[in-house]
Amino acid sequence: MTYTDIRLGDIVQMRKPHPCGSAQWEVVRLGADIGIRCQGCSRRVLLPRSQFTRQVKLLVSRNEKADASLNHPCP
């Protein structure tokens, strides 16, 4: 699994925990920068994509709605 294949709504674990103690984040924005929201305190952080791919440790859960929409053609 490469961490370049990240989708909105995915939950990822970062290498270093947030000061609130949580290490799990939800992906809320994709682009040149990736926006993530802490699952512990709801703080939002914007990271450059290169920094995000270095700091992600693992993919905790995949957004099921995003997977289903990729398999259906557009109407």
Image (tube, helix red, strand yellow):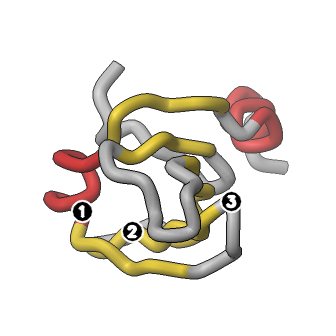
User: Could you tell me which secondary element the residue under label 2 belongs to?
Assistant: strand
Kind of element beneath mark 1: helix
* Real-space Cα separation, disc 1 to disc 3, in angstroms: 20 Å
- Answer with left or right where residue 62 lies relative to residue 68: left
The image position of residue 17, as x and y in percent, is: 42, 54
> How busy is the neighbourhood of tag 2: few (under 14 within 10 Å), some, or many (20 plus)?
many
**Mark toward the start of the polypeptide (2 vs 1):** 2
For the residue pair 27 and 66, the one nearer the viewer reads as: 27
Task: Single out the mark in the foreground, 1 or 3.
Answer: 3
> Residue 61 is drawn in which quadrant?
top right
Residue occupied by mark 3: 39
Q: What mark, if any, has residue 41 been given in the picture? A: none
Residue at screen point 55% across, 80% down: 44
Whether label 2 touches label 1, CB < 8 Å? yes
Considering depth in this image, is 61 or 66 the residue closer to the camera? 61
| Residue at x 24% of width, y 62% of height | 49
Query: Mark 3 or mark 2, which is nearer to you?
Result: 3
Query: In which quadrant is the N terminus drawn?
Result: top left
Q: Amino acid at mark 3?
A: Gln
The disc, 3 or 2, on the residue closer to the chain's N-terminal end is 2
Residue 38, position in %: x, y?
60, 65
- Residue type, mark 2 in image: Ile
Which residue lies under the disc numbered 1? 49
Q: Disc 1, disc 3: CB below 8 Å?
A: no
Q: Residues within 10 Å of mark 1 (few under 14, many from 20)?
A: some
Amino acid type assigned to the residue bearing label 1 in the image? Arg
